[in-house]
Amino acid sequence: MSEELQVWIDQDLCTGDGLCAQYAPDVFELDIDGLAYVKDDSGDLLQAVGVRTSVPAHLRLEVIDSAKECPGDCIHVVRTADEVEIAGPDAA
């Protein structure tokens, strides 16, 4: 299973709990506003609304778990090939 995934956060729903940053600190980070954001592969915080970043293969499970455990239900994990959400509030 080597399909590529992307992840993004809906900051309007983010509770600032920080669980995602505990699960996958290379992908998620809390900013000064107390909300979580995704980071690109060089570690830069991506703050544009709805911006996505690729999920590193070795962190797939951590990112999916963070979406499932997020109290704000605001993390969206999408399969790059067909845009299907596999974890998060819109997952089937």
Image: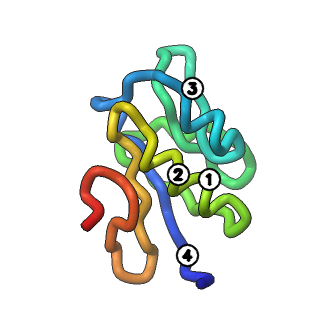
User: Do tag 2 and tag 3 residues touch (Cβ < 8 Å)?
Assistant: no
List the residue tagged with mark 4. Answer: 4
Q: Secondary structure at mark 4?
A: loop
Proximity of marks 1 and 2: CB atoms separated by less than 8 Å = yes
| Marks 2 and 3, the one that precedes in the sequence | 3
Q: Which numbered tag is attached to residue 65? A: 2
Closer-to-camera residue (69/41)? 69
| Amino acid identity at mark 2 | Asp
How many other residues sit within 10 Å of disc 4, few (<14), some (14-19) or many (≥20)? some
Residue 55, quarter of picture: bottom right
Circle 3: residue type? Leu
Q: CA distance from mark 1 to mark 2?
A: 5 Å
The residue tagged 1 is 62
Q: Dot 2: within a 10 Å radius of its alpha carbon, few (fewer than 14), some, or many (20 or more) residues?
A: some
Residue 30: numbered disc = 3
How far apart in space, not on screen, are marks 4 and 2 (Cα)? 16 Å
